[in-house]
Image (tube, rainbow, N blue to C red):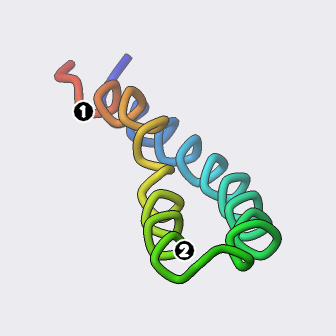
């Protein structure tokens, strides 16, 4: 598969994932995290903020593979 096609497929996949992940993360932040102490909130918001990267790393590696 040409690299250009992989980039297109990967970009669409990343956008779809983030469009699903963002509302779930916001719902978690609104319902559960708002009741915790501020120090715990900072840690949990950081985890939610970078949490989308870990599931997408294999996709990003696949996209960047040479032809």
User: Which residue is tagged 2?
Assistant: 41
Q: Position of residue 48 (x, y in %)?
A: 53, 60
Question: In the image, is 4 to the left or to the right of 47?
Answer: left
**Residue placed most toward the observer, 66 or 2:** 66
Separation of marks 1 and 2 at Cα, in angstroms: 35 Å
Q: In this view, does 40 lie above or below 60?
A: below
Say the numbered circle drawn on residue 64.
1
**Considering only order in the chain, which callout, 2 or 1, is on the residue closer to the N terminus?**
2
Image quadrant for the C terminus? top left
Q: Where is residue 22 in the image (x, y as percent from the top left)?
A: 67, 63
**Residue placed most toward the observer, 33 or 47:** 33
- Residue, x 17% and y 22% (percent of image)? 66
**Residue placed most toward the observer, 8 or 10:** 10
Q: In this view, does 15 lie above or below 45?
A: above
Question: In the image, is 57 to the left or to the right of 29?
Answer: left
Image quadrant for the N terminus? top left
Q: Position of residue 4 (x, y in %)?
A: 34, 36
Q: Please tell me whether mark 1 sits on a helix, a strand or a loop.
A: loop
- Residue, x 39% and y 39% (percent of image)? 7
* Residue extending farthest front: 37
Q: In this view, does 57 lie above or below 62?
A: below
Residue 6, quarter of the rendered image:
top left
Within 10 Å of the Cα at label 2, are there few (<14), some (14-19), or many (20+) other Cα atoms?
some
* Residue extending farthest bottom: 38
Residue 62, quarter of the rendered image:
top left
- Residue, x 48% and y 51% (percent of image)? 51
């Amino acid at each position: 598969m040409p690299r250009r096609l992989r980039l297109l497929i990967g970009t669409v996949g990343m956008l779809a994932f983030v469009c699903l992940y963002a509302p779930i993360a916001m719902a978690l932040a609104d319902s559960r995290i708002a009741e915790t102490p501020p120090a715990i909130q900072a840690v949990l918001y950081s985890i939610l903020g970078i949490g989308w990267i870990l599931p997408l790393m294999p996709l990003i590696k696949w996209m960047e593979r040479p032809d």
